Amino acid sequence: MAIDDDAGRCVSADIAAGISPAAALFHSLADENRLRIVARLARGEARVVDLVGELGLAQSTVSKHLACLRDCDLVDYRAEGRQSFYSLTRPELMDLLASAEHLLAATGHAVVLSPIHGTRHGTAHGAADARGTLRAELDHDLEHLGQRAGEIEGKTVS
């Protein structure tokens, strides 16, 4: 359900109105707050209260955007007691966002949309800066993996 602030329309309504499913999907991703929610959920599941605190958005705003993303089958939740834990349902979404990052960098408008590729979600910066950030994050991840491998090798396996 891509939220249209004026009409409250969703993807299903867009498709019923004759808009192609592809256009409806991109419409649902056209909001910066939804992209921030997707980026956060790419790091792991979260409750609405977690998203409110981490993203600095109102609870009603987060709930509306999650409903939109759920309607597109990009996000779903699992209930645990009285709590709902939201997560991404489509790993392909991260591939789409990574491709968008590459396309925007090629056009001179580098952004980081995916936490897999960076940490400054949606912040414009130069392509060279983006490459430097990615290189630093990759080096950090490789160092962490090396340390973890050393820990595993140091343990006795029975």
Image (spheres, rainbow, N blue to C red):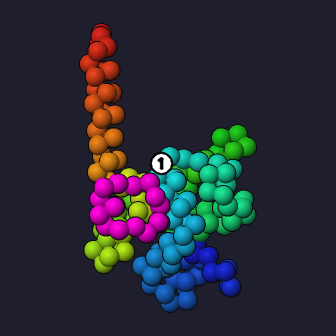
Which residue lies at the image location 66% right of the left edge and 58% below the top edge?
56
Is residue 65 toward the left or the right of residue 117 in the image? right
Which of 67 and 31 lies nearest the eye of the viewer? 31
Residue indicated by mark 1: 43
Query: Which corner quadrant of the image does residue 113 belong to?
Result: bottom left
Is residue 53 toward the left or the right of residue 75 in the image? right
Which residue lies at the image location 50% right of the left edge and 72% below the top edge?
29
Query: Which corner quadrant of the image does residue 33 belong to?
Result: bottom right
Residue 88 colored in magenta in the image: no
Quadrant containing the C terminus in the rendered view: top left
Which of 154 and 122 lies nearest the eye of the viewer? 122
Q: Position of residue 108 (x, y in %)?
A: 32, 76
| Whether residue 139 is situated above or below residue 94 in the rendered picture | above
Disc 1 element: loop
Q: In this rendering, does residue 115 appear at all? A: yes
| Whether residue 31 is situated above or below residue 141 in the rendered picture | below
Q: Residues within 10 Å of mark 1 (few under 14, many from 20)?
A: few
Q: Position of residue 154 (x, y in %)?
A: 29, 15
Q: Position of residue 120 (x, y in %)?
A: 46, 58
Query: Which corner quadrant of the image does residue 133 belong to?
Result: bottom left
Q: In this rendering, does residue 63 appear at all? A: no
Which amino acid is tagged 1? Arg
Is residue 97 toward the left or the right of residue 43 in the image? left
Is residue 27 toward the left or the right of residue 135 in the image? right
Which of 133 and 53 lies nearest the eye of the viewer? 133
Residue 131 colored in magenta in the image: yes
Magenta residues span 118-133
Q: Position of residue 16 (x, y in %)?
A: 55, 85
